Amino acid sequence: MRQWIILFKKEVKESIRNFKWIWIPVVFILLGLTQPVVSYYLPDLLEQFGGLPEGAAAAFPVPTGSQVLAETLGQFSQIGLLVLVLAFMGAVAGERNNGTNIMILVKPVSYASYISAKWAHMVLLALVSFTAGFIFSVYYTFLLIESVPAAHIIQGALVYGLWLTFVVTVVLTLSTIIKSPAAVAFLTFGVTITLSLMSSLLPEIMTWSPGMLSSHSHSFFMNGYGNEGFWLSLMCTILMIAVMLSLAIYVFRKKEMAVHTT
Amino acid sequence: MSLIKTDNLTKTFNGTNAVDGINLNIREGACTALLGPNGAGKTTTLNLLTGLMNPTKGKISFDKRYSGDRRKYLGYLPQYPKFYGWMTGIEYVVYAGELGGLTASEARTRAEELLNLVGLTDAGKKRISGYSGGMKQRLGIAQALVHNPKLIILDEPVSALDPIGRREVLELMKRLKETTSILFSTHVLHDAEQISDDIYIIQDGRVVINGGLEELQKKYQQPTVHIETEENLEEWSMSLESAPWVRHLKAEKQKLTVTAESIEDARNALLTDERLRQLKLNKFEIEKTSLEDLFMEVTK
Amino acid sequence: MDEIVNELQAVPWPVVAPIIIIQFLLMVIALIDCLRRGGETKGPQWVWILVIVFGGIFGPIIYFLFGRRND
Ligand SMILES: Nc1ncnc2c1ncn2[C@@H]1O[C@H](COP(=O)(O)OP(=O)(O)OP(=O)(O)O)[C@@H](O)[C@H]1O
Ligand SMILES: [Mg+2]
């Protein structure tokens, strides 16, 4: 455990030094601030500059609070996830490719700790960024539009946080298996987009899918409870995260660390 | 006393044996050199010993005093050490020490001590990304030593260095030898001769020659006599062939090279030889072949 | 002239200002990072400075993701 903390602290320190701990939260905050403002002023703006025919602006009413929060999550799922995946695509592969992990792994270091410390750090950074951005979004939504029950917000945010954790775990696992960071990012997007699309197109057969979590979180904002099948997809997601993390550790153990000899 | 033994250690890459049935016996307290040209399989052998690679065949056994995770007892400096450039030298050594099982304060003290030893006391506060090759090499040695390993494994510790850096690191290794067992690889015989006790000469993944340095030097230091005369000496040289002290001889017109069993016998016999005198001696030279010649010979 | 003043007054400054400030903050952090690492960027530094300053919200993000050489 002591060693795990040492490895974890190194990850944190590295990301502080290269500003990941500043710029990623700032991007989420920016996204979180912008969405409520855009939602609130969009009808106004359309009216002023849009040159829309009379009455068309009425088709764009100011959305409800929970809608705005859901839209914010939509932003997080696009730009936010893009940023997270690209920032972490080299998590394991990077150190392996440039050989910095060699001198670390010849120390009596547990491979499971090495991988899980990286995972924990990535999850922490993702969740802190998300929370920071979401707090600002909630504040602006309350200020400009209307308040939403705090319990609904917290429940919805937790559910969405699990989806983020899932995606981050996909990145980490692929990064242990695949050498090329670009391929890692590409495949992660492939997986997340497929899951999300399938979940919205075929909700009946995708009830188990982690891709359902965002729509569950929208439902929490609105009603305070998830859609049908919420528990199933929650459990499946947690299970899949556990399986992927174990797989990452297993694969990492099996791999030969020394790749550059001559 | 033996620290590590390998038995028929073999590593195959795509059908070719990079390491081909190597038997090593690394003695505790000794400095052992793996000597061989590029591509001989030195790095692969060391990677197998550290566990960074798995052998295709064969066995590595540590002495039974050193059971459990072998990495506890090993310090390793790769051929091309790669550091986290964003860390400072001291941070890196402290980190390595903590991973090696030291407490934070132990690691700190030990790191300062080691940076001092390798001459990086001041540079230790700077980021590694700004280090020169020689500084990285010395930092690499410091991190290898940090958790007080029984054996440090250094892969070509001086190859990448300029002559000054080379001498510094060799001096450092000489000092380390007093307290730690060392296993290092090199392709320069001279380096091996300077500091090692045991030598393994490796070629194409096999041990060609091995033994203690002095023993090898004795064994392969054959005195050779070069003779040149005015007259053709080929006929005379026939008479030498049966002499008991001659091991090998080659004559060509006015030139003769004799490898002798013993330098004394050779000198006595030749200098008292009346017929040699009549051939009008131009040159008489005694030379001792060194390990160098042998090394050149086997790695040709 | 009056129109511009009117429009400027119409902008809900208390609401928009934080967004502008934070975006500016992001740009400044990216600039500091870029300048501090000297030549250690992928590609010429001055290109990255242009990207950061004129690339809107995405400029700094692209710089952070792709502009830096790993160390
Ligand atoms: N990962 C690998 N895949 C395929 N072949 C390899 C691999 N690593 C090493 N080899 C081959 O194995 C042989 C031995 O390589 P090794 O690096 O052990 O030699 P070396 O003695 O350390 O050489 P050098 O003095 O150049 O460092 C070489 O022919 C090399 O090409
Ligand atoms: Mg080598």
Image (cartoon, coloured by chain):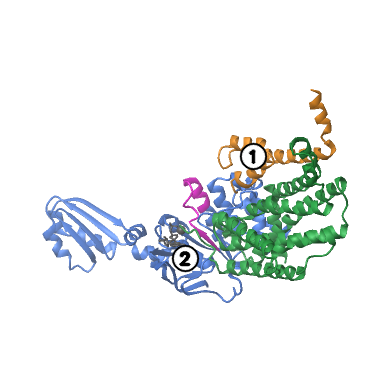
What mark, if any, has residue B45 been given in the picture? 2
**Which residues make up the magenta segment?**
B152-170
Image spot of residue A209 (x, y percent): 69, 67
- Residue at 39% over, 58% down: B37
Does mark 2's beta carbon lie closer than 8 Å to ligand 1?
Answer: yes
Rendered orange, the chain in question is C
Label 1 marks which chain's residue?
C
Question: With B289 as the anchor, is B198 left or right in this view?
Answer: right
Q: Residues within 10 Å of mark 1 (few under 14, many from 20)?
A: many
| Chain displayed in green | A
Q: Residue at the far front: name it.
A: A54
> Label 2 crowding class (10 Å Cα cut-off): few <14, some 14-19, many 20+?
many
Residue kind at label 1, given as amino acid type: Cys
Residue B16 % position (x, y): 39, 67
**For the C terminus of chain A, which image quadrant?**
bottom left
Residue at mark 1: C34
| Residue drawn 67% across the image and 47% down it | A18
Q: Is residue A165 magenta?
A: no
On the image, the x and y values in percent for residue A197 come to: 65, 60
Residue B154 included in the magenta stretch of the image: yes
Give the residue type at disc 2: Thr
